[in-house]
Amino acid sequence: MMNRLLQIILYGCIVWLVPFLVAIPFYSPDGTLLFGEPVFKSVMIVVGALIGAFLIVRYYQNISENYIREGIYLGVVWLLINWILDLVILLPLSGMDIIQYFCQIGLRYLMIPVMSVMAGYIAAGAGSR
């Protein structure tokens, strides 16, 4: 169980870190967005979904039962990791208040548990055939 928990935490941090690193070149040294906001947000959503989907598939390669429960657990832990890292790192950098953050960014992270639970449903169905 501990190895699986460490894997979930590590993958959750990677799910947060990769889009964060990809976002850096989109900003000037003074913090000004260099490209249009719609393009930036689209890139962030696609990068986040891509890395999330890839790591969900990697995670499920080591799971042989309770797929839906694992998807719920994975999704909730990753959601919390992403929110916490954003609140500690991104919020101070962006200058947003908490309400702005959740309206513009935080709600989008609900995609994480949706993807992980759906992957659990798919895995459960594939395992019953």
Image (cartoon, rainbow, N blue to C red):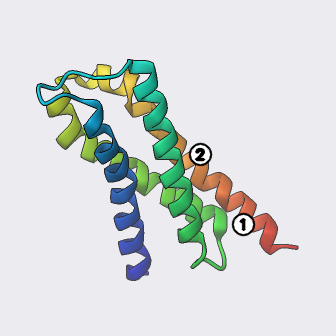
- To which residue does mark 2 refer? 114
Q: Position of residue 13 (x, y in %)?
A: 33, 58
Q: Is the N terminus in the top left, top right, bottom left or bottom right quadrant?
A: bottom left
Front in this rendered view, residue 96 or 24? 24
N-term mark: 1 or 2: 2
Q: 65 above or below 24? A: below
SS of the residue under disc 2: helix
**Residue 81 visible in the displayed image:** no
**Residue 58 visible in the displayed image:** yes
Q: Please tell me which residue is depicted at 46% across the width and 34% down the height of the picture.
A: 43
Q: Residues within 10 Å of mark 1 (few under 14, many from 20)?
A: many
Q: Position of residue 40 (x, y in %)?
A: 40, 28
Q: Which quadrant of the figure has residue 58?
A: bottom right
Q: Position of residue 92 (x, y in %)?
A: 14, 32
97 displayed left or right of 54: left
71 displayed left or right of 123: left
Q: Which mark is residue 123?
A: 1
87 displayed left or right of 10: left
Q: Amino acid at mark 2?
A: Val
Q: Residues within 10 Å of mark 2 (few under 14, many from 20)?
A: some
- The single residue placed furthest to the right in the displayed view is 129
Q: Which quadrant of the figure has residue 129?
A: bottom right
Q: 128 above or below 46? A: below
Q: Amino acid at mark 1?
A: Ala
